[in-house]
Image: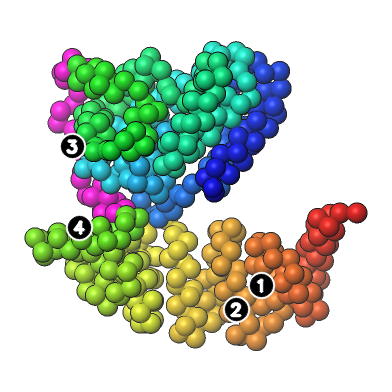
């Protein structure tokens, strides 16, 4: 029932959007309209699908995607790449440069060439503006069809292919010409253009062919088990034949000596399975790998991560340390060890590992900073914890827990004005206005800083105004 409710809510959203962006129901989509629609599309995706937020995995997929984008001519859009936590084999693009790939499809891959192949194809759909083209060429389509298209994309990507397809089929049955499914011409064009830019970015292009064959050969039972990718990207047999011929015809133009270092993919792939995969399957997979190759750093890393995920922390530390021996300056392994030490109550060791990770990491990792602050609190290093959480709150103002523990740290130091102030912000950000008013009123009474008083009064006024409007006349 929840999925059905999502269908109707998404349909309602996109009926509203279609009226807002295209009031005359004649679709000739400009770049700006596509960007506006994309922003609202992302809001709906964020509410209905679970994203993989692990920084290592996200950064890696974005690095591969941006490498391909760098081979394109100047683009009107900024491309963004997202990993959806979903086992179903799927990847898709929204208007204006948002590319999505399911974790299950990445798990099925063996190297970066395969990941690049799928991303390159989806980048080509965006560059060719195929979704916009489907809308534009239809000229006059019903609001329900646009809603069905949007809902179909979202639900299909979320693994509910049957429900998403039902929406599209119902609109088609009503005599509409626009559906979620790309045309054969769209697919061939995306393959041709995608292969061109893949090879210009330094890939061989063979990864797309290998991944399509994997998707085609995946076992299924009944139409509801068919990978969503096959439903939304048609003519897979024709595509495989075309890509095969293309690769044969361009083999002299492709840099056969180009070698993609395997390590980045292997570490990201291992982490994805351990962090996002089904627990029992991941545990069995890495345990088998350890039995076969006890010194393999990848096997030890994956086994350590899945052991930590299942609560076996001391065992996890043993295997993560083995992985660290092979990559002693890897900030992500250091952070993982530090996190497990923290959860095991081994705070001095946790702080040492986490601070080492923060020094080596190429950019600030909010999870690293948060764990450092939490560990400092446990060790009684309260002033240092305050500095850490203030740093985190300044760099990531949407990190709600940073404000909570900043308030708690100030409270332990006896600085109650600051404690109530930051706890008030924490509850305000969570839209818990009752507790926000309580703490902010306390902060107002205790602070002696005129500018801080003025800031608090403004926040209180805004909260009260919002509550009054919510209650109505």
4 and 2 marks in contact (CB < 8 Å): no
In the depicted structure, whether residue 298 falls above or below residue 107: below
Nearer to me, 427 or 15: 15
> Which mark lies nearer to you, 4 or 2?
4
Query: Which residue, given by chain and number where applicable, does mark 3 sit on?
Result: 259
Q: Secondary structure at mark 2?
A: helix
Q: Which residue is at 36% across, 37% downward? A: 224
Q: Is residue 382 left or right of residue 337?
A: right
Element on which disc 4 rests: helix
Q: Which mark is residue 444?
A: none
The residue where tag 1 is placed is 423
Residue 450 position within the rendered picture, expressed as x and y whole percent measured from the top left: 81, 71
> x, y (%) of residue 113?
24, 36
For the point 42% across and 36% down, which residue is it? 161
User: Disc 1 to disc 4, how far (Cα)?
Assistant: 44 Å
Q: Residues within 10 Å of mark 1 (few under 14, many from 20)?
A: many
- The residue tagged 4 is 285
As measured in the structure, the alpha-carbon distance from the residue carrying label 2 to the one carrying label 3 is 51 Å
Q: Which region is colored magenta?
A: 246-273
Q: Quadrant of the C terminus?
A: bottom right
At 18% from the left edge and 33% from the top edge, which residue is drawn? 258
- Label 3 to label 4: alpha-carbon separation: 28 Å
Tag 1 secondary structure: helix
Q: Earlier in the sequence, mark 1 or mark 3?
A: 3
Residue density around tag 4, few if under 14, some if 14–19, many if 20 or more, within 10 Å: some
Q: Are marks 1 and 4 in contact (CB under 8 Å)?
A: no
């Amino acid at each position: 029932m929840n999925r059905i409710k999502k269908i109707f809510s998404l349909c309602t959203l996109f009926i509203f959007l279609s009226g807002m962006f295209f009031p005359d129901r004649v679709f000739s989509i400009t770049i700006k309209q596509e960007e506006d629609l994309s922003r609202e599309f992302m809001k709906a995706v964020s509410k209905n699908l679970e994203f993989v937020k692990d920084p290592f995995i996200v950064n890696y997929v974005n690095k591969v995607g941006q490498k391909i984008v760098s081979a394109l001519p100047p683009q009107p859009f900024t491309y963004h790449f997202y990993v959806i936590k979903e086992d179903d084999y799927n990847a898709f693009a929204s208007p204006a440069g948002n590319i999505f790939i399911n974790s299950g499809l990445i798990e099925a891959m063996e190297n970066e060439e395969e990941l690049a192949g799928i991303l390159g194809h989806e980048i080509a759909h965006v560059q060719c503006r195929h979704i916009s083209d489907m809308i534009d060429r239809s000229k006059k389509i019903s609001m329900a069809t646009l809603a069905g298209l949007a809902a179909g994309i979202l639900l299909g990507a979320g693994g509910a292919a049957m429900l998403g397809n039902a929406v599209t089929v119902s609109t088609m049955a009503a005599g509409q010409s626009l559906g979620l499914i790309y045309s054969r011409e769209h697919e061939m064009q995306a393959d041709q253009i995608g292969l061109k830019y893949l090879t210009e970015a330094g890939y061989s292009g063979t990864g797309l062919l290998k991944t399509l064959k994997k998707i085609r050969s995946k076992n299924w039972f009944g139409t509801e088990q068919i990978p969503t990718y096959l439903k939304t990207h048609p003519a897979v047999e024709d595509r495989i034949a075309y890509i095969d011929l293309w690769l044969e015809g361009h083999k002299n133009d492709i840099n056969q000596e180009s070698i993609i270092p395997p390590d980045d993919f292997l570490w990201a792939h291992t982490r994805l399975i351990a962090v996002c995969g089904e627990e029992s399957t991941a545990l069995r997979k890495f345990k088998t790998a350890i039995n076969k190759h006890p010194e393999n750093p990848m096997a030890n890393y994956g086994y350590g991560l899945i052991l930590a995920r299942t609560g076996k922390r001391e065992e996890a530390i043993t295997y993560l340390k083995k992985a660290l021996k092979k990559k002693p300056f890897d900030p992500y392994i250091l952070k993982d060890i530090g996190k497990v030490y923290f959860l095991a109550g081994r705070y001095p060791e946790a702080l040492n590992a986490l601070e080492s990770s923060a020094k080596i990491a190429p950019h600030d990792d909010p999870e690293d900073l948060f764990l450092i602050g939490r560990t400092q609190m446990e060790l009684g290093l309260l002033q240092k914890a305050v500095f850490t959480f203030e740093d985190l709150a300044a760099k990531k103002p949407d990190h709600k827990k940073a404000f909570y523990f900043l308030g708690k740290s100030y409270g332990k130091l006896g600085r109650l004005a600051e404690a109530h102030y930051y706890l008030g912000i924490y509850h305000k950000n969570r839209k818990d206005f009752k507790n926000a008013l309580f703490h902010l009123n306390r902060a107002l009474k205790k602070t002696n800083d005129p500018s801080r008083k003025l800031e608090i009064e403004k926040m209180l006024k805004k909260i009260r105004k919002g509550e009054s409007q919510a209650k109505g006349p």
